[in-house]
Image (cartoon, rainbow, N blue to C red):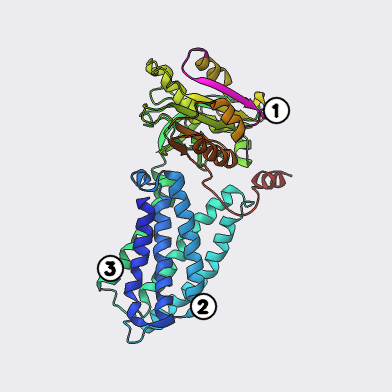
Amino acid sequence: MSGHLAIVLTTGVAWFAFADNGGASAFSFFIGATSILLMAWSFVLAIRLRWLEPFFGGLDSMYKAHRWSGALAVVLMFFHVRIEPEAENGVRGASKSVAEAAEDMAGWSEIMLYVLIGASLLRWVPYRWWRLSHKLLGIPFAFASWHFYTSKKPYGNGSAWGWYFGVFMVAGLVAYLVRIIGRDAVAQGVRYKVTSSETRGATMELRMAPLGQKLVHRVGQFAFIKIQLPGLREPHAFTIASAPDDAELRFFIRNLGDWTQRVQAVDLVGAQVFVEAAYGEFEPFGDGAQPVWWIAGGVGITPFLSAVSCLYASGVEPASGMVPHLVYSVSHIDDATALHELQAAGDAGKIKLSVLASNEGRRFSAERLADLVGAERMGGAHVAVCGPAGLVASARTAAYRLGAGHVETESFDLRSGIGPDLSREFHELGRS
Protein backbone atom coordinates (compact mmCIF):
# COMPACT_ATOMS: atom_id res chain seq x y z
CA MET A 1 0.00 0.00 0.00
CA SER A 2 1.32 3.42 -0.94
CA GLY A 3 0.25 4.88 2.43
CA HIS A 4 2.44 2.45 4.37
CA LEU A 5 5.29 3.15 1.96
CA ALA A 6 4.91 6.89 2.62
CA ILE A 7 5.33 6.28 6.37
CA VAL A 8 8.47 4.21 5.80
CA LEU A 9 10.01 6.75 3.41
CA THR A 10 9.25 9.85 5.49
CA THR A 11 10.80 8.24 8.57
CA GLY A 12 13.70 6.52 6.83
CA VAL A 13 14.91 9.70 5.14
CA ALA A 14 15.40 11.24 8.60
CA TRP A 15 18.65 9.28 8.92
CA PHE A 16 20.40 11.66 6.54
CA ALA A 17 19.77 14.56 8.92
CA PHE A 18 22.05 12.97 11.52
CA ALA A 19 24.33 10.58 9.62
CA ASP A 20 27.30 12.97 9.74
CA ASN A 21 27.21 13.06 13.54
CA GLY A 22 28.55 9.49 13.66
CA GLY A 23 28.21 6.45 15.91
CA ALA A 24 25.64 5.82 18.59
CA SER A 25 24.84 9.51 18.84
CA ALA A 26 23.64 9.64 15.22
CA PHE A 27 21.54 6.55 15.80
CA SER A 28 19.99 8.01 18.94
CA PHE A 29 19.14 11.25 17.15
CA PHE A 30 17.62 9.24 14.31
CA ILE A 31 15.38 7.06 16.47
CA GLY A 32 14.33 10.11 18.50
CA ALA A 33 13.35 11.94 15.32
CA THR A 34 11.65 8.83 13.96
CA SER A 35 9.63 8.57 17.16
CA ILE A 36 8.36 12.13 16.62
CA LEU A 37 7.53 11.43 12.96
CA LEU A 38 5.68 8.21 13.77
CA MET A 39 3.65 9.89 16.51
CA ALA A 40 2.73 12.66 14.06
CA TRP A 41 1.62 10.06 11.51
CA SER A 42 -0.41 8.30 14.21
CA PHE A 43 -2.31 11.50 15.02
CA VAL A 44 -2.92 12.30 11.35
CA LEU A 45 -4.32 8.82 10.70
CA ALA A 46 -6.57 9.11 13.77
CA ILE A 47 -8.54 11.93 12.09
CA ARG A 48 -10.07 9.34 9.74
CA LEU A 49 -9.55 11.35 6.56
CA ARG A 50 -11.58 9.54 3.92
CA TRP A 51 -9.33 10.60 1.03
CA LEU A 52 -6.48 8.67 2.67
CA GLU A 53 -8.40 5.37 2.71
CA PRO A 54 -7.52 4.28 -0.86
CA PHE A 55 -3.80 4.71 -0.08
CA PHE A 56 -4.04 2.33 2.89
CA GLY A 57 -6.71 -0.05 1.61
CA GLY A 58 -9.53 1.04 3.91
CA LEU A 59 -10.04 2.51 7.36
CA ASP A 60 -9.31 -0.81 9.06
CA SER A 61 -5.83 -0.80 7.52
CA MET A 62 -5.40 2.88 8.40
CA TYR A 63 -6.13 2.09 12.02
CA LYS A 64 -3.60 -0.71 12.03
CA ALA A 65 -1.00 1.74 10.69
CA HIS A 66 -2.12 4.23 13.35
CA ARG A 67 -1.64 1.70 16.16
CA TRP A 68 1.68 0.34 14.90
CA SER A 69 3.05 3.85 14.35
CA GLY A 70 2.14 4.87 17.90
CA ALA A 71 3.50 1.68 19.48
CA LEU A 72 6.79 1.81 17.56
CA ALA A 73 7.15 5.51 18.42
CA VAL A 74 7.06 4.66 22.14
CA VAL A 75 9.64 1.88 21.75
CA LEU A 76 12.01 4.16 19.83
CA MET A 77 11.57 6.95 22.37
CA PHE A 78 12.55 4.53 25.16
CA PHE A 79 15.85 3.64 23.46
CA HIS A 80 16.52 7.26 22.43
CA VAL A 81 16.36 8.40 26.06
CA ARG A 82 18.72 5.61 27.17
CA ILE A 83 21.41 6.42 24.60
CA GLU A 84 21.43 10.20 25.28
CA PRO A 85 22.78 11.71 22.03
CA GLU A 86 25.25 14.56 21.84
CA ALA A 87 25.71 16.78 18.79
CA GLU A 88 29.33 17.83 18.37
CA ASN A 89 29.42 21.38 17.04
CA GLY A 90 25.63 21.24 16.97
CA VAL A 91 23.18 24.12 16.76
CA ARG A 92 21.03 25.04 19.74
CA GLY A 93 17.30 25.27 19.09
CA ALA A 94 16.85 27.68 22.02
CA SER A 95 18.75 29.09 24.98
CA LYS A 96 20.31 26.62 27.40
CA SER A 97 17.74 27.36 30.12
CA VAL A 98 14.80 26.89 27.77
CA ALA A 99 16.29 23.67 26.37
CA GLU A 100 16.85 22.27 29.88
CA ALA A 101 13.27 23.13 30.88
CA ALA A 102 12.00 21.42 27.71
CA GLU A 103 14.11 18.36 28.53
CA ASP A 104 12.52 18.18 31.99
CA MET A 105 9.08 18.40 30.39
CA ALA A 106 10.04 15.59 28.03
CA GLY A 107 10.99 13.45 31.03
CA TRP A 108 7.55 13.95 32.54
CA SER A 109 5.92 13.22 29.20
CA GLU A 110 7.84 9.95 28.94
CA ILE A 111 6.27 8.66 32.15
CA MET A 112 2.85 9.96 31.12
CA LEU A 113 3.17 8.28 27.73
CA TYR A 114 4.02 4.90 29.26
CA VAL A 115 0.94 5.08 31.50
CA LEU A 116 -1.39 6.15 28.67
CA ILE A 117 -0.07 3.57 26.22
CA GLY A 118 -0.39 0.88 28.89
CA ALA A 119 -4.02 1.84 29.42
CA SER A 120 -4.54 1.75 25.67
CA LEU A 121 -3.01 -1.71 25.17
CA LEU A 122 -4.88 -3.47 27.98
CA ARG A 123 -8.26 -4.47 26.57
CA TRP A 124 -9.82 -4.92 29.99
CA VAL A 125 -9.73 -1.15 30.42
CA PRO A 126 -13.30 0.03 29.60
CA TYR A 127 -13.74 1.66 26.20
CA ARG A 128 -14.67 5.07 27.61
CA TRP A 129 -11.47 5.13 29.73
CA TRP A 130 -9.48 3.98 26.72
CA ARG A 131 -10.89 6.93 24.71
CA LEU A 132 -9.89 9.31 27.49
CA SER A 133 -6.34 7.97 27.48
CA HIS A 134 -6.21 8.59 23.73
CA LYS A 135 -7.43 12.17 24.16
CA LEU A 136 -4.53 12.86 26.53
CA LEU A 137 -1.80 11.47 24.24
CA GLY A 138 -1.33 14.84 22.55
CA ILE A 139 0.15 16.28 25.74
CA PRO A 140 3.30 14.09 25.84
CA PHE A 141 3.63 14.52 22.07
CA ALA A 142 3.62 18.31 22.48
CA PHE A 143 6.27 18.10 25.24
CA ALA A 144 8.44 15.72 23.20
CA SER A 145 8.15 17.98 20.13
CA TRP A 146 9.13 21.04 22.17
CA HIS A 147 12.17 19.20 23.53
CA PHE A 148 13.15 18.08 20.02
CA TYR A 149 12.79 21.64 18.69
CA THR A 150 14.80 23.32 21.48
CA SER A 151 17.56 20.71 21.83
CA LYS A 152 21.04 20.95 20.37
CA LYS A 153 21.08 19.20 16.98
CA PRO A 154 23.39 18.81 13.95
CA TYR A 155 21.24 21.33 12.03
CA GLY A 156 19.46 24.61 12.79
CA ASN A 157 15.70 24.93 13.09
CA GLY A 158 15.71 27.35 10.15
CA SER A 159 17.41 24.84 7.84
CA ALA A 160 15.67 22.51 5.39
CA TRP A 161 15.79 19.69 7.96
CA GLY A 162 14.41 22.03 10.60
CA TRP A 163 11.44 22.80 8.36
CA TYR A 164 11.03 19.12 7.49
CA PHE A 165 10.62 17.98 11.08
CA GLY A 166 8.77 21.16 12.02
CA VAL A 167 6.06 20.51 9.44
CA PHE A 168 5.49 17.01 10.82
CA MET A 169 5.35 18.23 14.42
CA VAL A 170 2.83 20.94 13.55
CA ALA A 171 0.79 18.48 11.46
CA GLY A 172 0.66 16.06 14.40
CA LEU A 173 -0.43 18.76 16.85
CA VAL A 174 -3.05 20.15 14.45
CA ALA A 175 -4.37 16.64 13.83
CA TYR A 176 -4.61 16.07 17.58
CA LEU A 177 -6.66 19.26 18.03
CA VAL A 178 -8.87 18.42 15.06
CA ARG A 179 -9.51 15.00 16.57
CA ILE A 180 -10.51 16.07 20.08
CA ILE A 181 -12.16 19.41 19.21
CA GLY A 182 -13.28 19.18 15.60
CA ARG A 183 -14.49 15.58 15.42
CA ASP A 184 -15.67 15.17 19.01
CA ALA A 185 -17.19 18.61 19.68
CA VAL A 186 -17.79 20.69 16.54
CA ALA A 187 -18.22 18.68 13.31
CA GLN A 188 -19.70 15.54 14.83
CA GLY A 189 -21.45 14.26 11.71
CA VAL A 190 -24.80 14.14 9.93
CA ARG A 191 -27.85 14.47 12.18
CA TYR A 192 -30.36 11.61 12.36
CA LYS A 193 -33.28 10.64 14.60
CA VAL A 194 -34.04 7.11 15.77
CA THR A 195 -37.38 5.97 14.32
CA SER A 196 -37.40 2.41 15.64
CA SER A 197 -35.32 0.00 17.68
CA GLU A 198 -36.15 -3.66 18.04
CA THR A 199 -34.10 -6.27 19.88
CA ARG A 200 -34.21 -9.94 18.93
CA GLY A 201 -32.00 -12.14 21.07
CA ALA A 202 -28.62 -10.44 21.43
CA THR A 203 -29.02 -8.15 18.39
CA MET A 204 -30.79 -4.81 18.09
CA GLU A 205 -32.05 -3.45 14.78
CA LEU A 206 -31.80 0.34 14.76
CA ARG A 207 -33.47 2.53 12.12
CA MET A 208 -32.82 6.25 11.75
CA ALA A 209 -34.26 9.03 9.59
CA PRO A 210 -32.18 12.06 8.52
CA LEU A 211 -32.76 15.47 10.10
CA GLY A 212 -31.72 17.34 6.97
CA GLN A 213 -29.20 15.97 4.51
CA LYS A 214 -28.70 12.23 4.16
CA LEU A 215 -25.44 10.39 4.67
CA VAL A 216 -23.85 9.46 1.35
CA HIS A 217 -22.50 5.90 1.42
CA ARG A 218 -21.75 2.87 -0.70
CA VAL A 219 -22.73 -0.76 -0.21
CA GLY A 220 -20.47 -2.42 2.37
CA GLN A 221 -19.36 0.74 4.18
CA PHE A 222 -19.59 1.46 7.90
CA ALA A 223 -20.09 4.62 9.95
CA PHE A 224 -19.49 5.89 13.46
CA ILE A 225 -22.68 6.64 15.38
CA LYS A 226 -22.91 8.90 18.44
CA ILE A 227 -26.24 8.57 20.28
CA GLN A 228 -27.03 11.84 22.01
CA LEU A 229 -28.22 10.42 25.31
CA PRO A 230 -26.37 10.45 28.66
CA GLY A 231 -23.71 7.75 28.80
CA LEU A 232 -24.12 6.81 25.11
CA ARG A 233 -22.37 9.67 23.28
CA GLU A 234 -19.06 7.91 22.63
CA PRO A 235 -18.61 6.96 18.94
CA HIS A 236 -18.90 3.33 17.87
CA ALA A 237 -18.49 1.86 14.39
CA PHE A 238 -21.17 -0.29 12.76
CA THR A 239 -21.69 -1.51 9.22
CA ILE A 240 -24.57 0.14 7.37
CA ALA A 241 -27.20 -2.50 6.61
CA SER A 242 -29.39 -0.32 4.36
CA ALA A 243 -28.97 0.34 0.65
CA PRO A 244 -27.52 3.71 -0.46
CA ASP A 245 -30.91 4.82 -1.86
CA ASP A 246 -32.97 3.86 1.20
CA ALA A 247 -34.74 6.70 2.99
CA GLU A 248 -33.48 5.52 6.39
CA LEU A 249 -30.22 4.19 7.77
CA ARG A 250 -30.28 0.76 9.37
CA PHE A 251 -27.77 -0.79 11.75
CA PHE A 252 -27.61 -4.08 13.63
CA ILE A 253 -25.98 -3.78 17.06
CA ARG A 254 -25.00 -6.96 18.86
CA ASN A 255 -24.68 -7.02 22.65
CA LEU A 256 -20.93 -7.54 23.03
CA GLY A 257 -19.80 -5.01 25.66
CA ASP A 258 -20.84 -2.47 28.28
CA TRP A 259 -21.88 0.22 25.75
CA THR A 260 -23.99 -2.13 23.63
CA GLN A 261 -25.57 -3.50 26.78
CA ARG A 262 -26.55 0.03 27.85
CA VAL A 263 -27.86 0.86 24.36
CA GLN A 264 -30.19 -2.13 24.36
CA ALA A 265 -31.54 -1.22 27.82
CA VAL A 266 -32.68 2.30 26.80
CA ASP A 267 -35.68 3.52 24.81
CA LEU A 268 -33.94 5.10 21.84
CA VAL A 269 -36.92 6.13 19.72
CA GLY A 270 -36.77 9.88 19.10
CA ALA A 271 -33.14 10.17 20.21
CA GLN A 272 -30.84 12.28 18.06
CA VAL A 273 -27.79 10.55 16.58
CA PHE A 274 -24.73 11.98 14.88
CA VAL A 275 -23.50 9.72 12.09
CA GLU A 276 -19.88 10.38 11.17
CA ALA A 277 -19.07 9.89 7.50
CA ALA A 278 -19.05 6.54 5.74
CA TYR A 279 -15.83 4.57 5.69
CA GLY A 280 -14.44 1.41 4.21
CA GLU A 281 -13.31 -0.05 0.89
CA PHE A 282 -15.21 -3.35 1.26
CA GLU A 283 -16.57 -4.42 -2.14
CA PRO A 284 -19.18 -7.22 -2.15
CA PHE A 285 -19.90 -7.30 -5.89
CA GLY A 286 -16.54 -7.28 -7.69
CA ASP A 287 -16.55 -6.15 -11.31
CA GLY A 288 -19.58 -8.25 -12.26
CA ALA A 289 -17.66 -10.42 -14.72
CA GLN A 290 -16.99 -13.36 -12.41
CA PRO A 291 -18.94 -15.53 -9.93
CA VAL A 292 -19.59 -13.90 -6.55
CA TRP A 293 -19.44 -15.66 -3.19
CA TRP A 294 -20.31 -13.98 0.10
CA ILE A 295 -19.22 -15.55 3.39
CA ALA A 296 -20.57 -14.06 6.62
CA GLY A 297 -20.25 -14.96 10.28
CA GLY A 298 -22.65 -13.65 12.95
CA VAL A 299 -23.27 -9.92 12.75
CA GLY A 300 -20.83 -9.84 9.81
CA ILE A 301 -23.93 -10.35 7.66
CA THR A 302 -24.67 -6.59 7.71
CA PRO A 303 -22.70 -5.48 4.60
CA PHE A 304 -24.44 -8.24 2.65
CA LEU A 305 -27.86 -7.09 3.87
CA SER A 306 -27.01 -3.73 2.32
CA ALA A 307 -25.96 -5.50 -0.88
CA VAL A 308 -29.16 -7.56 -0.97
CA SER A 309 -31.24 -4.41 -0.43
CA CYS A 310 -29.40 -2.83 -3.32
CA LEU A 311 -30.25 -5.82 -5.53
CA TYR A 312 -33.91 -5.44 -4.66
CA ALA A 313 -33.87 -1.68 -5.27
CA SER A 314 -32.15 -1.92 -8.65
CA GLY A 315 -34.63 -4.38 -10.13
CA VAL A 316 -31.85 -5.69 -12.36
CA GLU A 317 -31.60 -9.43 -12.72
CA PRO A 318 -28.02 -10.76 -12.39
CA ALA A 319 -26.49 -12.48 -15.38
CA SER A 320 -26.94 -16.23 -15.50
CA GLY A 321 -24.54 -17.91 -13.10
CA MET A 322 -23.57 -14.59 -11.48
CA VAL A 323 -26.15 -14.66 -8.68
CA PRO A 324 -24.21 -14.15 -5.41
CA HIS A 325 -23.95 -17.29 -3.30
CA LEU A 326 -24.21 -16.32 0.37
CA VAL A 327 -22.80 -18.69 3.02
CA TYR A 328 -24.07 -17.48 6.40
CA SER A 329 -22.51 -19.07 9.50
CA VAL A 330 -24.20 -18.68 12.90
CA SER A 331 -23.89 -20.44 16.24
CA HIS A 332 -27.65 -21.01 16.43
CA ILE A 333 -30.34 -20.54 13.80
CA ASP A 334 -32.18 -18.17 16.18
CA ASP A 335 -29.11 -15.93 16.19
CA ALA A 336 -29.32 -15.33 12.44
CA THR A 337 -29.87 -11.64 11.68
CA ALA A 338 -32.69 -10.71 9.26
CA LEU A 339 -32.93 -14.32 8.12
CA HIS A 340 -36.42 -13.76 6.66
CA GLU A 341 -35.02 -11.08 4.34
CA LEU A 342 -32.26 -13.36 3.15
CA GLN A 343 -34.67 -16.24 2.60
CA ALA A 344 -36.97 -13.93 0.62
CA ALA A 345 -34.02 -12.86 -1.51
CA GLY A 346 -33.18 -16.51 -2.09
CA ASP A 347 -36.76 -17.35 -3.02
CA ALA A 348 -36.79 -14.43 -5.47
CA GLY A 349 -33.63 -15.69 -7.15
CA LYS A 350 -31.56 -12.67 -6.10
CA ILE A 351 -29.08 -14.79 -4.15
CA LYS A 352 -28.29 -18.41 -3.39
CA LEU A 353 -28.43 -18.91 0.38
CA SER A 354 -26.66 -21.51 2.53
CA VAL A 355 -27.12 -21.15 6.30
CA LEU A 356 -24.70 -23.05 8.53
CA ALA A 357 -25.78 -23.38 12.16
CA SER A 358 -23.17 -24.79 14.54
CA ASN A 359 -25.76 -26.18 16.96
CA GLU A 360 -27.10 -28.30 14.10
CA GLY A 361 -23.67 -29.77 13.41
CA ARG A 362 -23.07 -27.51 10.39
CA ARG A 363 -20.13 -25.37 11.47
CA PHE A 364 -18.25 -23.40 8.83
CA SER A 365 -15.00 -25.04 7.71
CA ALA A 366 -12.80 -25.25 4.64
CA GLU A 367 -14.17 -28.73 3.93
CA ARG A 368 -17.79 -27.58 4.17
CA LEU A 369 -17.08 -24.64 1.85
CA ALA A 370 -15.52 -27.06 -0.65
CA ASP A 371 -18.69 -29.20 -0.49
CA LEU A 372 -20.83 -26.14 -1.25
CA VAL A 373 -18.60 -25.05 -4.12
CA GLY A 374 -18.61 -28.50 -5.68
CA ALA A 375 -16.51 -29.94 -8.46
CA GLU A 376 -16.52 -26.76 -10.55
CA ARG A 377 -14.51 -24.94 -7.86
CA MET A 378 -14.65 -21.16 -7.64
CA GLY A 379 -13.22 -20.41 -11.08
CA GLY A 380 -11.69 -16.99 -10.41
CA ALA A 381 -14.65 -15.90 -8.25
CA HIS A 382 -14.84 -12.64 -6.31
CA VAL A 383 -15.20 -13.68 -2.66
CA ALA A 384 -16.21 -11.22 0.07
CA VAL A 385 -15.84 -12.28 3.71
CA CYS A 386 -16.99 -10.49 6.85
CA GLY A 387 -17.20 -11.84 10.39
CA PRO A 388 -15.02 -12.97 13.31
CA ALA A 389 -11.27 -13.02 12.71
CA GLY A 390 -11.06 -16.82 12.82
CA LEU A 391 -13.75 -17.28 10.19
CA VAL A 392 -12.23 -14.59 7.97
CA ALA A 393 -8.79 -16.23 8.07
CA SER A 394 -10.20 -19.71 7.42
CA ALA A 395 -12.47 -18.53 4.59
CA ARG A 396 -9.69 -16.55 2.90
CA THR A 397 -7.31 -19.51 2.86
CA ALA A 398 -10.00 -21.94 1.72
CA ALA A 399 -11.28 -19.64 -1.03
CA TYR A 400 -7.86 -19.20 -2.61
CA ARG A 401 -7.31 -22.97 -2.51
CA LEU A 402 -10.61 -23.41 -4.33
CA GLY A 403 -9.53 -21.10 -7.13
CA ALA A 404 -10.93 -17.72 -6.08
CA GLY A 405 -9.56 -14.79 -8.07
CA HIS A 406 -9.85 -12.23 -5.25
CA VAL A 407 -10.88 -12.38 -1.59
CA GLU A 408 -12.23 -9.17 -0.08
CA THR A 409 -12.02 -8.84 3.72
CA GLU A 410 -12.34 -6.15 6.33
CA SER A 411 -11.57 -6.07 10.06
CA PHE A 412 -13.65 -3.98 12.44
CA ASP A 413 -11.43 -4.40 15.49
CA LEU A 414 -10.55 -0.70 15.62
CA ARG A 415 -9.24 -1.21 19.14
CA SER A 416 -6.69 -3.96 19.58
CA GLY A 417 -4.53 -4.81 22.53
CA ILE A 418 -3.50 -7.38 25.13
CA GLY A 419 -5.86 -9.56 27.13
CA PRO A 420 -9.62 -10.16 27.11
CA ASP A 421 -12.27 -7.45 26.79
CA LEU A 422 -13.63 -7.10 30.33
CA SER A 423 -15.52 -3.83 29.78
CA ARG A 424 -18.89 -5.41 30.61
CA GLU A 425 -17.55 -6.88 33.85
CA PHE A 426 -16.17 -3.46 34.86
CA HIS A 427 -19.53 -1.89 34.03
CA GLU A 428 -21.38 -4.40 36.23
CA LEU A 429 -18.85 -3.87 39.04
CA GLY A 430 -19.51 -0.13 38.91
CA ARG A 431 -23.25 -0.72 39.26
CA SER A 432 -22.94 -3.03 42.27
Magenta residues (range): 347-365
- Measured in 3D between alpha carbons, the distance from the residue under mark 1 to the one under mark 3, in whole angstroms, is 63 Å
Spot occupied by residue 367 in the image (x, y as percentages of width and height) = 61, 33
Q: Position of residue 43 (x, y in %)?
A: 42, 56
Q: CA distance from mark 3 to mark 2?
A: 27 Å
Residue 361's tag is 1
- Residue depicted at 59% across the width and 32% down the height: 298
Q: Amino acid at mark 1?
A: Gly
- Check if residue 234 falls in the magenta segment: no
Residue closer to the observer: 206 or 30: 30
Mark 3 or 2: the one toward you: 2
**Secondary structure found at label 3:** helix
The answer, for residue 306, to whether it is visible in the render is yes
**Figure quadrant of residue 122:** bottom right
Q: Residue furthest bottom?
A: 89
Nearer the camera: disc 1 or disc 3: 1
The verdict on residue 351 being magenta is yes
Residue 190 lies in what quarter of the image? top left
Gap in angstroms between the C-alphas marked 2 and 1: 57 Å
Marks counted in the figure total 3
In percent of width and height, residue 258 lies at 63, 41
Q: Which residue is mark 3?
A: 163
